[in-house]
């Protein structure tokens, strides 16, 4: 049986610190995702992509509620940056939506590709002692991959400046992940 942080060496995070970081950052990330969709729906709420945005937002709301519950149950301090992610998520969603539906989908693809990698790393970190948390993360990862695929199917790569837009959003997501784990 492999346990979480069993191969740690001096200076590595303890098992408890690994779990705290995972829960903290995932709760923050899902808050940001919900706010991105809310921003997109504020601009595109009557457009043809509205039903897709609502469906993806509902799934991410379920993810957020799950991490809110886990943070409370395990007495983990949420990130102090939640107010920033609350605003930044909405601004990112509304801003990309103002560029058009394809840009909004490009935002979804960039965010979800980053989250796919992030959740995959987390699942690898978790041992058999955290099988339930690993299963939750893997389930949510599959839904995030579905969101990415929806974005690709709806023209994300046809958004003006797609490579630059995607790279900028991914960089911002990686920075938010790093900060949320620590602050």
Image (tube, grey):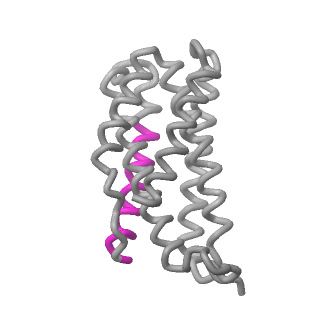
Residue drawn 34% across and 62% down?
78
- Where residue 59 appears, as percent x and y from the top left, is 44, 48
Q: Is residue 98 above or below residue 7?
A: above
Residue drawn 58% across and 23% down?
154
Residue drawn 45% across and 70% down?
20
Quarter of the image where the N terminus is located = bottom right
The reply, left or right, for residue 115 in relation to residue 30 is right
Q: Is residue 83 above or below residue 63?
A: above
- Where residue 80 appears, as percent x and y from the top left, is 31, 56
Quarter of the image where the C terminus is located = bottom left
Q: Quadrant of residue 170?
A: top right
- Where residue 72 appears, as percent x and y from the top left, is 32, 72
Q: Nearer the viewer, residue 110 or 143?
A: 110
Predominant secondary structure, magenta span:
helix
Q: Quadrant of residue 71?
A: bottom left
Q: Nearer the viewer, residue 26 or 141?
A: 26
Residue drawn 45% across and 60% down?
182
Q: Residue furthest bottom?
A: 1
Q: Residue furthest left?
A: 83
In magenta segment, residue 63: yes
The reply, left or right, for residue 43 in relation to residue 20 is left
Please state the extent of the stretch shown in magenta in the rendering: 54-74
């Amino acid at each position: 049986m492999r346990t979480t942080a069993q191969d740690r060496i001096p200076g590595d995070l303890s098992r408890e610190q690994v779990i705290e970081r995972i829960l903290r950052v995932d709760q923050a990330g899902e808050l940001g995702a919900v706010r991105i969709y809310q921003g997109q729906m504020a601009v595109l709420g009557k457009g043809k992509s509205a039903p897709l945005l609502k469906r993806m937002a509902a799934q991410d709301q379920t993810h957020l509620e799950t991490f809110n519950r886990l943070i409370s149950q395990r007495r983990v301090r949420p990130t102090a940056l939640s107010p920033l992610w609350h605003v930044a998520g909405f601004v990112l969603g509304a801003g990309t939506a103002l560029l058009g539906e394809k840009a909004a989908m490009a935002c979804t693809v960039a965010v979800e590709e980053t989250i796919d990698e992030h959740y995959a790393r987390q699942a690898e970190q978790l041992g058999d002692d955290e099988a339930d948390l690993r299963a939750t993360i893997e389930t949510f990862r599959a839904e995030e991959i579905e969101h990415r695929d929806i974005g690709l199917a709806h023209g994300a790569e046809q958004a003006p400046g797609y490579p630059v837009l995607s790279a900028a959003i991914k960089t911002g997501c990686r920075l938010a992940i790093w900060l949320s784990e620590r602050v």
